[in-house]
Image (cartoon, helix red, strand yellow):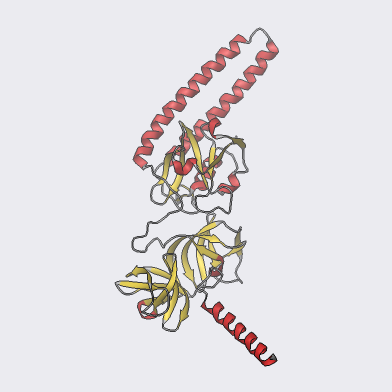
Amino acid sequence: MKRICKGMLCLILALSILAGMAIPAMATELKTGIGIVTTSCLRLRAKPNTDSEVIGKAYYGDAVVIIREVDDWYLVNCNLEIGYMHKDYLDLRERKNVRLGYASFDAVTNIRKGPGTDTAIVDQAPKGDVCFIIGFNCEWYKVTYEGQTGYVRSDLLTLLEKPYDNYGSPGNTYHEASTSAKSSTTAASSSTSASSSTSTSSSSSASSSASSSSSASSSSSSANSSSSSSAAASTLGEQMVAYAKNFLGYRYVWGGKDPSTGFDCSGLTWYVAKHFGIRIGRSANDQLSYGTYVSRADLKPGDIVLFERTYTSSVRATHAGMYIGNGQFIHAANSRVGVVISSLSETYYSSRFICGRRLG
């Protein structure tokens, strides 16, 4: 009886080990390299044999992430699908410049100067934050993060997009914008007129108020002081909007924070605020902590507008822009359209709006 029990335990243990070996690649597994497709059309299969189900395809020149070798096959990540491709039709590269798109950090992660733990740490990213992968080097991804370039171990990132240069790739899919640059410019013009009209009306009302309160000098002084403060804030916001509009049509670049390279969403708001001597956080989530809270109904030109769930739900704010008036905001939307003006009434943005933050 003891022998039977012992034999059963050994069998269970062996099956457990085999099951563990059969588990498809997880984000925690170091990757082997980048595979470049060398045939016109290469099938991605569910198992490492030609009789198994075809679950995807890649085309000549496409890049796949090679996870590990399995006999005559590679286990790969092909356009976010995990499966097997035959080795004969993939050119394995241990070093390759390739735009794999956005990826999220699976844990608090050190970003290093080179592809190795013996190189200096240039930054540290929190779990759930995102970076942009621009290459691969001996089990490490080369990334851009917060305006810096560095290396992250390939077992610490989860890919979120299809490689940008693959056949049929839509490019950036984690920031939506349905407004074209042309229509945005027109909207910006009408928005400026509306803001100007509102400003003139406010000034006129403030002057009338100040005149009617001249019977009490202390009250008049207080009213004038309050009116001046309000006018100054309005002027600053409009100046910030006018400056931000100079960058309409500029390209979207992950980690970008100046006109020479392009902008990402929080890079644009950060750059505009910096121009006016206002210091705010670099990421959208950081900017949630600066300035004072403003509801959607109380937004004024120059307020930062913040959104959630545009590419991840692991941090509170994931996208930022600047309110310009008339229910619209300017932002670095995505790599397809760059810096544009969009409406807060669009379902995508209205359903993700968190709040505004008033600076200055």
Q: Quadrant of the N terminus?
A: bottom right
Residue most extreme to the front: 1
Task: Give the residue displayed 37% in from the left and 56% down from the top.
Answer: 170
Residue most extreme to the left: 40
Report which quarter residue 5 is drawn in: bottom right
Q: With 77 as the anchor, is 294 left or right in this view?
A: right
Report which quarter residue 184 is drawn in: top left
Q: Quadrant of the C terminus?
A: top right
Task: Please indicate, yes or no, whether residue 281 appears anywhere in the rendered image.
Answer: no
Above-or-below relation of 80 to 12: above
Above-or-below relation of 336 to 297: below
Q: Please state the horizontal and vertical placement of residue 20, each as a whole percent of the image.
A: 56, 77
Please name whichever residue, 101 or 232, is drawn nearer the observer in this view of the structure.
101
Please name whichever residue, 331 or 127, is drawn nearer the observer in this view of the structure.
127
Please name whichever residue, 145 or 102, is drawn nearer the observer in this view of the structure.
102
Q: With 233 as the anchor, is 62 left or right in this view?
A: left
Q: Please state the horizontal and vertical placement of residue 323, each as a whole percent of the image.
A: 50, 36
Task: Give the residue displayed 54% in from the left and 44% down from the top.
Answer: 270
Task: Please indicate, yes or no, whether residue 44 appears anywhere in the rendered image.
Answer: yes
Above-or-below relation of 114 to 124: below
Q: Please state the horizontal and vertical placement of residue 198, each as a whole percent of the image.
A: 48, 23
Task: Give the residue displayed 67% in from the left and 92% down from the top.
Answer: 3
Q: With 120 as the anchor, is 352 left or right in this view?
A: left
